[in-house]
Image: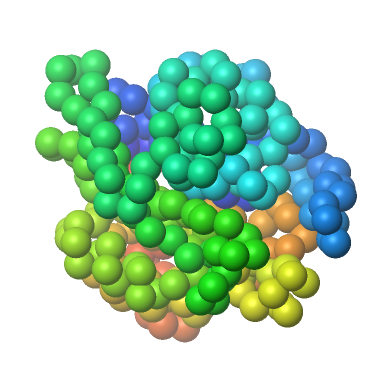
């Protein structure tokens, strides 16, 4: 497999002959005026949407926040044959397939096999956060002869990471949304994994290679790549981390 980090949570994953796009956000830097707050994008995409090439599948952890699906990303969905997200997103966006927790779909591979994509639970903040921030999903990708890949989505719950790790062990690659995102709507509670949480998640995920995303590019991310790698270094787990250079396709397995 190969993965290319575009910026923020957005990444391209090449696996088993299929190309997946994670949380498309391709707007240039700008402010988004939202009810009661402003979201600020600080950096543009490392690769513009027009230069991506064909995408087979979009994995959208949720459609309600601009850092996970912005205006340019939403427009791009119209050209992607398969878009997987939450059941709510399937109601709000045409031609989206919503996956309930633990629901799976088989996607045909060019070689005649399949990649099974399973929707897995995520909690975007503390208990009860769904009432304020909406429902989020993660994804697990599996296929014969392929590494098993976990894409966490905007999840702050280590309990859910453990449940997913136990159910799908062994997970080979974990794309963890970190950055300790915060909002005034929840009094500064962390909405995604902190760097310290990510270390604990890595321990739960056993030997999985950890790919951090969602740590830069937006003003509401309170911890950056430096804090992330420092936490893993302090824990003696730095060799588990694949810190990607933006815009560069990196082979992991």
Q: Quadrant of residue 49?
A: top right
On screen, residue 212 versus residue 252, left or right, reads: right
Residue occupying the point 51% across, 55% down: 135
72 lies above or below 221: above
- The x, y position of residue 66, in whole percent, is 70, 46
Quadrant into which the N terminus falls = top left
Q: Which residue sits furthest bottom?
A: 234
Q: Quadrant of residue 239?
A: bottom left
- The x, y position of residue 171, in whole percent, is 24, 56
Task: Pick the residue in front: 19 or 242.
Answer: 19
- The x, y position of residue 85, in whole percent, is 46, 40
Residue occupying the point 27% across, 27% down: 107
99 lies above or below 184: above
Residue occupying the point 61% across, 74% down: 190
Residue 219 at least partly seen: yes
Q: How many numbered circles does the render carry?
A: 0
């Amino acid at each position: 497999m190969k993965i290319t980090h575009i910026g923020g949570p957005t990444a391209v994953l090449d696996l088993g002959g299929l190309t997946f796009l994670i949380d498309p956000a391709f707007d240039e830097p700008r402010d988004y005026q939202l009810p009661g707050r402003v979201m600020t994008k600080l950096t543009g995409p490392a690769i513009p949407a027009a230069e991506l090439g064909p995408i087979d599948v979009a994995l959208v952890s949720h459609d309600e926040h601009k850092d996970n699906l912005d205006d340019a990303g939403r427009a791009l969905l119209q050209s992607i044959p398969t878009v997987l997200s939450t059941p709510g997103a399937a109601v709000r966006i045409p031609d989206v397939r919503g996956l309930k927790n633990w629901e799976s779909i088989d996607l045909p591979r060019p070689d005649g096999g399949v990649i099974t994509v399973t929707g897995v639970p995520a909690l975007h903040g503390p208990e009860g956060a769904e009432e304020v921030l909406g429902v989020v999903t993660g994804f697990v990708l599996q296929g014969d002869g392929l590494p098993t890949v976990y894409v966490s989505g905007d999840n702050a719950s280590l309990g859910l990471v453990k449940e997913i790790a136990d159910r799908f062990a062994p997970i080979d690659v974990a794309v963890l949304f970190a950055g300790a995102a915060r909002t005034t709507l929840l009094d500064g509670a962390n909405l995604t994994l902190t760097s310290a949480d990510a270390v604990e998640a890595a321990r739960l995920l056993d030997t999985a290679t950890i790919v951090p995303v969602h740590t830069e590019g937006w003003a509401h991310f309170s911890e950056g790549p430096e804090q992330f790698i420092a936490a893993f270094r302090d824990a003696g787990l730095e060799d588990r981390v694949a810190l990607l250079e933006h815009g560069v396709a990196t082979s992991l397995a």
